Amino acid sequence: MKGGIFFTGVVPDSLGHKSLAVNLSDLAAMGAKPIGCLLGLGIPSVDEAWLASFSGGLNALAERWGCPLVGGDTVATKDGIVISVTALGILPYHESGLLRSAAKVDDDIWVSGPLGAPDIALQILAGNLEDPQGCLPKLRPTLERPEPRVALGQRLLGFAHAAIDISDGLTQDLSHVLDASHVGAVLTLKDLPVHDGLAAFDPSAIQRAVLHGGDVYELCFTAPAVHRQRIGLIGQSLGLQLSRVGKIRAEPGLFANIDDSLIEIEPKGFDHFLGGEQ
C-alpha cells in the first residue's frame, strides 16, 4: 500500500481502512473527487474472518467517499500479506488540480491537522521509544486509521496553489513542493500544531516527530495571504484544525524561524527504498 506501515497484530478492519485511506490522501492532495478503486491482494491462505474484517474496513471508507471497489485481483503468496490499492479520481473540467509545482512567493503555508502522533505511536510499537504513561491507546488510531482530507482538497480548488500530503514527513514532503516550485520556505516552529497526546514525551522526540515523522496523511498546502479568512471558515465548516505554519519565499532552502533567527532545516522523512526514516 502507498506509504503505509502496519504491524502483524493490526486489526484487519483497520488495515482495510488504511489501505484505501492512504491512497485517497493522494487524491485529496490534488483536490480530486474519488470515483473508484482497485485492490490487489496477496494472501498465504484463505481466512474468511480476516477477509470479512479487512473488506469491512475498506468498504466502509469507500462508501463514505463514493469510491467503490471496481476491480482487482486476489492471489496466493508463499509468505506474508501483500496489499496494493489504486484509487481513481476526477477533477472539474479545465481544472489542473493542486500541484506540487505551483507554490508562489509570499504564499502562506498551512497544515490541516495536528502532527507527530502517528510517528510516536510507530516508534512505541517498534520498540524504539518508551511509553511510561501508557499513551499508546490514544495515539495508535492516528497511525492505523488515518482520515484522508478529501473534502478539504476539493474545497481548496480555485484559490490555493500547491498541496501535498505529509505521508513521508512534513519537512521531506514540503521540500518536494519547494523543489518542484523552485522556491524556498520559512517555518515558524511555535505555530506547528502538536497532537495533544504527546505532552508526556521528551521535547526532542516530539520535535523530531512533528518535523520529520511520516504516516500523517494531513495536507500541507500553500495559498495567498488574502485567503486567510476563507481558509479559516473552511476549517470551521469541516471541523479541521487548519494551522498557518510558515511562508514561501524566493530564496531556496527550508528554514525555521526560532526567536526571530533563521535556522536551516535538513529535510528528513521516510525513504521507501531504504526502508526507514533518513
Image (cartoon, rainbow, N blue to C red):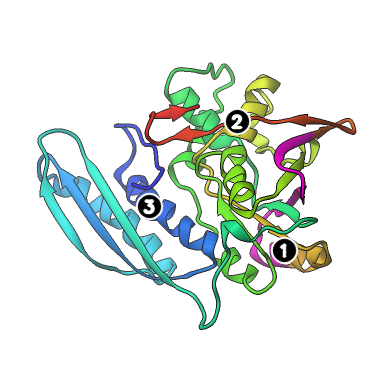
Q: In the rendered image, which residue does mark 3 sit on?
A: 17
Q: Secondary structure at mark 2?
A: helix
Residue 197 shows in this picture: yes
Q: Identify the residue at image location x=63%, y=54%.
A: 181
Q: Position of residue 36 (x, y in %)?
A: 34, 69
What residue occupies the far bottom of the structure in this picture?
93
Inspect the image, locate mark 1, and give the three-letter code of the amino acid beneath it: Gln
Tell me the number on the disc at residue 209.
2
Q: Secondary structure at mark 1?
A: helix
Look at the image and give the residue range highlighted in magenta. Answer: 234-256
Q: Identify the residue at image location x=58%, y=65%.
A: 98
Q: Identify the residue at image location x=38%, y=29%.
A: 275
Pointer 1 local density, CA inside 10 Å: few below 14, some 14–19, many at least 20: few
The answer to which image quadrant residue 268 occupies is top right
Relative side of 259 to 56, left or right: right
Nearer to us of marks 1 and 2 is: 2
How far is mark 1 from mark 3, CA to CA? 25 Å
Inspect the image, locate mark 3, and give the three-letter code of the amino acid beneath it: His
Residue 138 shows in this picture: no
Q: Position of residue 103 (x, y in %)?
A: 67, 58
- Dot 2 or dot 3, earlier in sequence: 3
